[in-house]
Amino acid sequence: MTDPGAPAAASPDAPPTRVSYLVFRLERRIRACLDDALARHGVTTTEYMALSELRLRDAPSSADLARIAFVTPQAMNLVIRDLEQRGLIRRDPHPGGGRALRARLTPKGLSTVRRCDHSLDAIEAVMFAEIDHQARTALAETLTLCARALRPDTRP
Amino acid sequence: MTDPGAPAAASPDAPPTRVSYLVFRLERRIRACLDDALARHGVTTTEYMALSELRLRDAPSSADLARIAFVTPQAMNLVIRDLEQRGLIRRDPHPGGGRALRARLTPKGLSTVRRCDHSLDAIEAVMFAEIDHQARTALAETLTLCARALRPDTRP
DNA sequence: ACCTTGATAGCAAGTTACTTGATAACCACG
DNA sequence: CGTGGTTATCAAGTAACTTGCTATCAAGGT
């Protein structure tokens, strides 16, 4: 059978493979593996990403998280409210008043995100098996620069 | 207002940013830009990827394309049939018999995919503005290796 | 001949992770 | 006091998948 990874020739003008396309493909692969692994912990990849961001930041609101993840406030709110109902996070009104609710991980949420981390560690170990340390850091750096260049909000 | 790009401190144990997460974020950004640009040409990102693959390969069937893109045959079939109805591709029965239909780009499909290429060129130009040529090739190479490592089908 | 096997195309329904649009609460400002 | 900005939340819709099923076609085994 034809190898799905190799172009298999037969093209009049051969356009080079786009980096964007490589990003799409890799994202699909990681997500498929991660969805599968996280299902055993009862969370989705989207939820895991929100939980990770909550651990990293200082009690952001749902709208803050939406800006971070480049999604609409409504989309993030659905995720956050679901996580709250399942006891993985809790939300308190902002001390300075206002309508914003500051979200934090509960102990249960923290232990969940730690278990998910181990699942992702296993996937990245496979993914990076043939990649040396220098190439990994170069990859992370370049990906960060690319994402920053495509930001909609113009920043310094 | 908080910068959504920087972690903004305040975390007990600071876990390092995962490469997977960087891939997810960049994919989201590229897709948002590309969906927007391709809408003017009347195709979606998914359709554009299928059209690109059709230009690169020698008249694959819908099932072939599904394997290439890591989706189910049904999912790819929906895309292919829609593209056929819109006259961007045509399908002929396989000369060796069988049920498979070999898909090819029509002239209209080819000109469409070329116009889409220019849209993607513009996006990648922005994305790579601060990235030198060596880092770009290193990025492409590492992404390819990572995707290959996560393949479900074991190949040499 | 007959029947399974394997690969394909196609239909139907359901899911996930979003989207836009609208409503309402809350604060600060002029 | 009203006006604008930010937030949460409800409602409906969409893109891009998924699983499950059926039907067609060719090749191989008995």
Image (spheres, coloured by chain):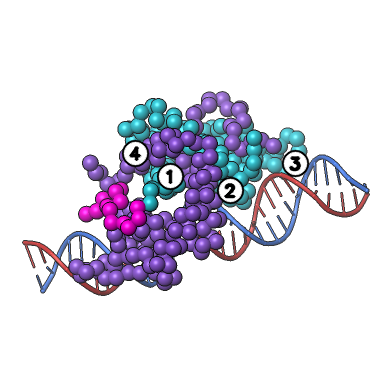
Chain colours: A purple, B cyan, C red, D blue
Compared with D30, B57 (above or below) is above
- Residue at position x 38%, y 48% in the image: B16
> Disc 2 and disc 4: Cα gap in Å?
30 Å
Residue beneath disc 1: B19
Question: What residue sits right under mark 3 in the picture?
Answer: B98
Within-10-Å neighbours for mark 2: few <14, some 14–19, many 20+:
few
Q: Please report the bounds of the magenta region as a residue range.
A: B1-14
Distance (Cα) linking label 3 and label 1 = 44 Å
Q: Locate residue B68 relative to residue B132 in the image: left or right.
A: right
Looking at the image, residue C16 lies above or below residue B83:
below
Q: Earlier in the sequence, mark 3 or mark 2?
A: 2
Residue visible at 39% across and 56% down in the picture:
A52
Chain containing mark 4: A
Q: Which mark is residue A145?
A: 4
- Label 2: element kind: loop
From the image, tell me which residue sits under label 2: B71
Which numbered disc, 3 or 1, marks the residue that appears first in the sequence?
1
Q: Chain of mark 1?
A: B
Q: Secondary structure at mark 3?
A: loop
Dot 1: element: helix
